[in-house]
């Protein structure tokens, strides 16, 4: 199981971004328990699908205001209806991970019962997170078009640029590297949870 603990960065000097984030994230079908505010500027969710965990973590990285801790391992059964009432090693690992994420590259960290497997997943996810975090607005727009299933021709039309410009933006944004990195992070999270 995977627990995501997400903390707003710089919340003492910023507006409360938790309520709008919760509204945007809504009830994602891939989550076992939805995101809920746990305390102050922190939210938590439970997932059992590593692909959903990677998608959520990188979505939060792109939003630029969050530290993301991912705890891997068992949770106490039965899992309570309220996310914030959950307990178990994955919840404890998520707490450790979010504290480490505050100063980690990409602002994401993974912790779990097998330190080597968790470290491998952590490294893969951090590399992709750094790539996503450094992306320009133009690169983000091109990647977003591709993520929604567009062809480069469709993306060019939607963005009002040439197909060659889309190709250049995708290359600069590291789209192909991100795609491979996501798959690697998913596999390593699955291994860390086995």
Image (spheres, helix red, strand yellow):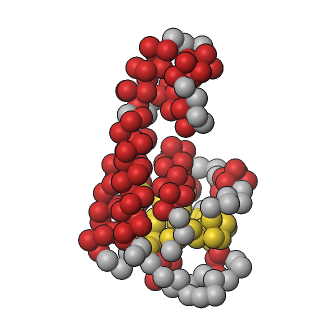
Name the quadrant containing residue 29. Answer: bottom right
> Which quarter of the figure has residue 175?
top left
Q: Residue 163: tell me if it is visible.
A: yes
Q: Is residue 10 visible?
A: no
What is the residue that sits farthest to the top in this orientation?
162
Of 167 and 44, the residue lying toward us: 167
Q: Name which residue lies at 36% across and 62% down.
A: 188
From the top left corner, tell me how far across and down residue 80 is, in percent.
67, 83
For residue 105, above or below residue 33: above
How far from the left and from the top, in percent, is residue 131?
A: 37, 41
Above or below, comparing residue 124 to residue 44 in the picture = above
112 in relation to 182, above or below: below
What percent of the width, then of the height, locates residue 141?
A: 55, 29
Give 17 or 80, whichever is nearer the viewer.
80
Relative to 135, is 6 above or below? below
Q: In the image as oriented, which residue stretches furthest toward the bottom?
A: 77
Q: Quadrant of the C terminus?
A: bottom left
Left/right placement of residue 168 relative to residue 37 reads left
Q: In percent of the image, x 55 and y 44: which residue is there?
A: 63
Q: Is residue 10 left or right of residue 135?
A: right
Horizontal side of 169 relative to 8 (left or right) equals: left
């Amino acid at each position: 199981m995977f627990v995501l603990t997400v903390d707003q960065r710089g919340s003492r000097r910023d507006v409360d971004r938790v309520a709008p984030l919760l509204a945007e994230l809504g009830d994602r079908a891939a989550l076992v328990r939805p995101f809920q505010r746990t305390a102050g500027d922190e939210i938590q969710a439970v997932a059992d699908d590593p692909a959903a965990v990677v998608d959520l973590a990188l979505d939060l990285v792109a939003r630029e205001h969050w530290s993301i801790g991912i705890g891997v391992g068992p949770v106490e059964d039965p899992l309570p209806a309220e996310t914030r009432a959950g307990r178990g090693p994955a919840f404890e690992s998520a707490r450790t991970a979010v504290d480490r994420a505050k100063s980690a590259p990409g602002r994401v960290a993974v912790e779990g019962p097998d330190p080597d497997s968790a470290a491998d997943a952590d490294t893969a996810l951090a590399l992709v997170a750094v790539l996503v975090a450094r992306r320009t607005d133009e690169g983000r727009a091109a990647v977003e078009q591709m993520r929604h299933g567009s062809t480069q021709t469709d993306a060019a039309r939607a963005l009002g640029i040439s197909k060659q410009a889309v190709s250049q933006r995708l290359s600069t944004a590291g789209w192909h590297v991100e795609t491979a990195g996501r798959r690697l992070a998913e596999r390593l999270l699955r291994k860390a949870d086995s």
